[in-house]
């Protein structure tokens, strides 16, 4: 039933854009629409057509796990697609313009020149934005697995511990509980914590450091995403103040979340508060992003986002302050929009904690 509803979303796009079919190539969308769990496949969907094209590595997997699509084994994607489009006299085909490379587009238009290729982005980009109850539950379960994993290595986080050792220990514990890590874990301390996407190094954690841990689990295809910032041994008054500003910025951002507001309002609220405290230039990224089958997906919580929040959208709220040579603070939770506000799906307490 869920898959039928998802296909109906594609049919509405077919109607609005007057298309004979839509080519789906983003692997998360392939999974969302067909249930295929492999790494390589494309879908061709028309009003009465459902095809999944894959190579011999995944044919059996597709036949066992995909319902409602005819499985076609191909050796070369463009040639196989050309034969299919020609056989069914399809002339006007939509494609994910933010996924297909320029080289592939050139190949498609050259070898399949009897088709009019129509770029589609926004309609497909928002396809998975409103989550079903089952999807929300899987994200919440992934978050619990990740949080339990962090709790299990908490005793290792202490002065003298090495960033890379902590990240590997956390990765191991997440993989014991979940299907995989959601992304490369970030463990960054001291001056390294001033880099939002720092790579865990061989640096030892020192007393007085901030330590940022950005982590998540992947479970049945769905991701969690969460960041905590601890103090090691002690935090001076200035660092405590910075931590509290970030925490308050997240709290103020939470207050505006509800259906039918612009996504950028969440970003503006957090950003304006941090700016009012004199740290605006040290908040260098968006306030959040959607989470689901991909770790970063629609909606995007930035000052440039014009989209409207809807019930059952899932996204992160993660303000931060990053000061070179001093360190950084990021506090991140994943939330779901409810009919009158929001609920937090991540579990680890976000209070100042000195280890």
Image: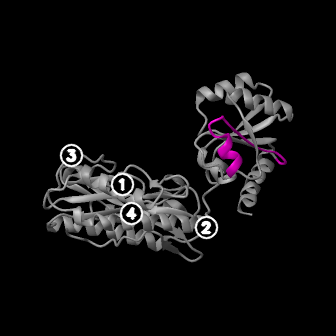
Q: Is residue 282 visible?
A: no
Highlighted magenta segment, given as a residue range: 47-65
Q: Residue at x 53, y 68 (%)?
A: 336
- Tell me if 167 is positioned left or right of 17 in this view: left
Residue 338 is labelled as none
Mark 2: secondary structure: helix
Q: Residue at x 63, y 50 (%)?
A: 31
Percent of width and height locating residue 286: 42, 54
Sequence order check, earlier mark of 4 and 2: 2
Mark 3: secondary structure: loop
Tell me the mark number nearer the camera, choosing from 2 and 1.
Answer: 1
Residue 332 is labelled as 4
Q: Which residue is mark 2?
A: 134
> In the figure, residue 100 lies in which quadrant?
top right
Q: Are marks 4 and 1 in contact (CB under 8 Å)?
A: no
Sequence order check, earlier mark of 3 and 1: 1
Q: Is residue 310 magenta?
A: no
Q: Which residue is mark 1?
A: 171
From this view, report whether residue 283 is shown above or below residue 132. Answer: above
- Tell me if 85 is positioned left or right of 287 in this view: right
Tell me the mark number nearer the camera, choosing from 4 and 2.
Answer: 2
- Quadrant for the C terminus, please: bottom left
Mark 4 → mark 2, Cα distance in angstroms: 23 Å
Query: Is disc 1 surrounded by few (<14), some (14 to 19) or many (20+) residues within 10 Å?
Result: many
Mark 4: secondary structure: loop
Sequence order check, earlier mark of 4 and 3: 3
Mark 2 → mark 1, Cα distance in angstroms: 25 Å
Sequence order check, earlier mark of 4 and 1: 1
């Amino acid at each position: 039933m869920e898959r039928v509803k998802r296909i109906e979303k594609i049919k509405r796009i077919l109607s609005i854009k007057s298309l004979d079919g839509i080519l789906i190539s983003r692997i998360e969308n392939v999974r969302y629409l067909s249930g295929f769990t492999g790494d390589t496949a494309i879908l061709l969907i028309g009003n009465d057509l459902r095809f999944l094209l894959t190579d011999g590595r995944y044919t059996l997997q597709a036949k066992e796990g995909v319902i409602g699509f005819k499985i076609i084994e191909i050796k070369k994607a463009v040639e196989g697609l050309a034969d299919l489009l020609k056989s069914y006299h399809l002339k006007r085909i939509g494609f994910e313009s933010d996924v297909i490379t320029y080289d592939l587009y050139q190949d498609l238009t050259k070898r399949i020149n009897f088709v009019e290729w129509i770029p589609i982005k926004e309609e497909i980009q928002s396809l998975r934005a409103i989550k079903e109850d089952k999807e929300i539950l899987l994200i919440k379960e992934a978050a619990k697995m990740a949080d339990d994993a962090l709790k299990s290595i908490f005793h290792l986080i202490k002065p003298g511990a090495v960033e890379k050792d902590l990240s590997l220990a956390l990765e191991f514990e997440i993989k014991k509980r979940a299907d995989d890590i959601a992304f490369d874990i970030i463990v960054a301390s001291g001056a390294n914590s001033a880099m939002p996407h720092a790579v865990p190094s061989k640096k030892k954690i020192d007393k007085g450091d901030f330590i940022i841990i950005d982590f998540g689990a992947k479970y049945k295809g769905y991701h969690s995403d969460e960041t905590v910032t601890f103090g090691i041994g002690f935090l001076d008054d200035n660092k405590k103040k910075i931590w509290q500003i970030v925490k308050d910025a997240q709290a103020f951002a939470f207050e505006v979340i509800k259906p039918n507001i612009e996504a950028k309002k969440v970003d503006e609220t957090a950003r304006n508060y941090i700016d009012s405290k004199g740290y605006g230039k040290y908040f260098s990224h968006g306030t959040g992003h959607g989470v689901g089958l991909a770790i970063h997906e629609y909606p995007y919580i930035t000052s440039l986002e014009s989209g409207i929040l809807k019930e059952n959208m899932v996204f992160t709220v993660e303000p931060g302050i990053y000061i070179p040579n001093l360190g950084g603070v990021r506090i991140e939770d994943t939330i779901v929009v409810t009919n009158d506000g929001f609920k937090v799906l991540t579990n680890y307490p976000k209070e100042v904690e000195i280890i």
